[in-house]
Image (cartoon, rainbow, N blue to C red):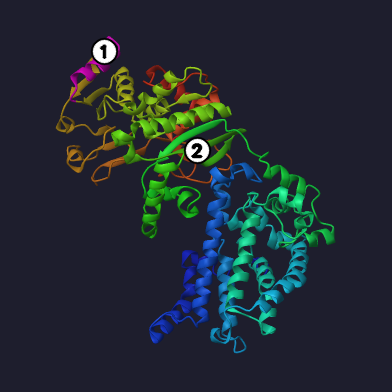
Amino acid sequence: MGAPLSSWPWAGLGAYKYVLYGPLVAQVAQAWREQGGAPTDSWCLHLLLLLALRSLTHQLWFSYANMLFFTRRRRVVPDGVDFRQIDAEWDWDNMVIMQTLLGAMAISSPVFPAVSELRAWDPRGWAVALLLHVAVSEPGFRWAHRALHRAPLFSQYHSKHHSSPVTQPLTSAYGTPLESLVLTLAMAAPLAGAFMAGAGSVSLVYGHVLAFDYLRCMGYSNVEVISHRAFRAFPLLRYLIYTPTYLSLHHQEKDSNFCLFMPLFDLLGGTVHPRSWELQKEVDQGKNDRVPDFVFLAHVVDVVSSMHVPFAFRACSSQPWTTRLVLLPLWPVAFCLMVLQVLCSKTFTVSFYCLRGALHQTWTIPRYSFQYFIPPMKDGINRQIELAILRADRMGVKVLSLAALNKNEALNGGGTLFVDRHPDLRVRVVHGNTLTAAVILHEIPGSVKEVFLTGATSKLGRAIALYLCRKKIRVLMLTLSSERFLKIQREAPAEFQQYLVQVTKYHAAKTVKTWLVGKWLSPREQRWAPAGTHFHQFVVPPVIEFRRDCTYGKLAAMRLPKDVQGLGSCEYTMERGVVHACHAGGVVHCLEGWEHHEVGAIDVDRIDVVWKAALRHGLSPP
C-alpha cells in the first residue's frame, strides 16, 4: 500500500477510465433531447467543452514543442524524450479527469449559480480573480510546492513528477493525485473568490482555466518562447512571468524556482536560481543548438501516415504505424498540408536521438511516395535532395543516408547524381543498401538451396543474387530482360554462374518455398507460391499478406544499440528501437568513421564487412 493520494483510483481501468465522463455525457444528451438543441444553459455541456479545449491546448503546445524545424535552436534541455518517459506520462490527463469530476460535483451544489444567472462577461470578476491569483494562488502554491520537495513528501509524491528528465507540455499535468489537488486549489481559488463576490461569469471560467493551462504548458514546453530582449527592456517583467528555462532549472536542480507563474515570490523567498536569466539569454540566442553528426534523409510515405510524425500525435509516433480510424476525419487537413508542402516547403527536421556522444537527426523531404513516380516531379525532388545534401555539407554533417525512394536508381542513380555533380563534398552520402542486403541474406536459413528472386535486376536484387550464388544457392531470377540477366551473371565468378537462372514467369517458382520479394506481388502472383512459403521482402511498400498458408517477413531493419539516448518515436511500421536497414547502414558508416561515399551499385565483397561492423557496434536484428 502506498501513501494516501499517491496513486489514481482508476489506474486499473486503462483506456476505460474515460467512462467516468459517462454521467456528464448522459446529462447533456438528455438535456439536448428535451430542448431540441444544444443546452447552452447546462454546466455539464460547458464542462465537456472546457475539457475539449483544455485537451486541445495541451495538444497544440505539444505539437509546437516538437516542431524541431521551428524550435530546435531554442530548446532548453537539448536531450530527447525517450520511450520510458513517454510510457510514464501516458496517462497525463488523469489530472484533467479529476478536475472535471470535481467541477461536476461543484455545479451540483445548490449554492452554485446556474448558467442563466451569470453574465457572459463581467470585468469585476476578472479583476477579483487576478487579485486572488497574485495574493493567494501564487504564494500558496509556492509554499506547497516547496513542502513537496522535503522528506518524506518528495519520495512519496513529488519524485514521480521529477522523474521526467526532459519537460514537455504533457509533463505539466503528470503527477500524483495530491499534486493535482494542489494545482486544482491554485486554479480554483480565484474562480471561487470571484463567484463569492457575485462577479463570476461564463467567460471567466473559460478564460481563467485555459490561461492557467496555457501558462503551465508554456513553462513545460522546453522551448524558450520569451525573448531575452523583453527582459532587458523591461527588467521587472522577469519577476512577473516565468520562462521554460526558469522551470527547467527547477526540474534539474530541484532546490530553486518553486513559483507557479511569478518568480517574484521566489525572489521574496530567496529561491531564485542565480543562472535563471543568464541561461535564458543563452537559450534564446540559440547557443544550445548543435550540428548533427549523422542525418537520415527520409520522405513521407502517404497522406494518412504523415500524421505519424512526432509533432502530430504522441500516441501514433511512439508506436509502430497502423491506420487508425479515429484519424480518418483529419485526412482533409493532412491533404491540405501535403499541397502546401509541395508549393512552398523545404526539407525539415523531424526527430533526433543521441548515440555515443553523436547527434543523429532525421530530416524529411516534403514529398510523398506516389509523387516519386510522377515524371514531371522528378527534377524537383532531386533538387530538394541536392539542397539537403549541400545544407548538410555546409553545416559539417559527417554522414547523410538516403532513405527508400530518395536513393531510387531511376531517380538519381542511388545518389551518384549528387556525388558526381559535387565531387568536393565533405559529407559522406550513403544509401545503406549494403546493410539492407546483409539483413535480408542473414534471414535466409542455412539449409536453403534454392530461392526465387523478384526485382532481380535492381540494385539490391543484383547484390543478393551474386552473394547467394557464391554460396552455391540456386537463384531463380525473375526478369524479362536477358541482357540485364546476362550482365549480372557475368559478374559472378565463372564457377558460380551456373547457380544463376533466368525465369520469366511466376509459375517457375511453384516448388520454391523461399521467395525474395523486391517487386510488389499481386494476389494472383502470390498464388503460385507453394504452401509454407516464406516471403522475404525488400519492396516499398511491403506486399499485402494474402496467403494464410504462408509467412511474410518484415522490411529489412536493425535494432539500434541499447545505449541510444532520447529515442522516442518509431520509424513508420518499425517497432520501438528499430530502424530501417538503410538508416542503420548510415549509422554504421558514421560509427566506423568510413570516409568513402556509398552510392551506386552495392559492393558484394563489403556485405559481410558491413554486417560484422553493425554487430560489433551493438546493432542487432529485431
**Hey, which residue is sitting farthest top in the picture?**
494
- Residue, disc 2: 362
Q: Look at the image and give the residue range highlighted in magenta.
A: 480-497
On the question of residue 541 being in view, the answer is no
Residue 297: image x %, image y %?
A: 46, 34
Against 58, residue 549 (above or below) is above
Query: What residue is rendered at 63% in x and 49% in y?
Result: 223
Residue 19: image x %, image y %?
A: 46, 72
- Residue, disc 1: 490
Residue 530: image x %, image y %?
A: 19, 38
Q: Can you tell which quarter of the image residue 104 is in?
A: bottom right
The stretch drawn in magenta includes residue 272: no
Tell which of 392 and 561 is nearer to you: 392
The stretch drawn in magenta includes residue 481: yes
> Total of numbered circles in the picture?
2
**The residue tagged with tag 2: helix, strand or loop?**
strand
Amino acid type, residue under disc 1 in the picture: Arg
**Hey, which residue is sitting farthest front in the picture?**
233
Query: What residue is rendered at 37% in x and 60% in y?
Result: 329
In the rendered view, does 300 fall on the left or right side of 239?
left
Query: Dot 2 surroundings within 10 Å: few (below 14), some, or many (20 or more)?
Result: many
Query: Dot 1 surroundings within 10 Å: few (below 14), some, or many (20 or more)?
Result: few
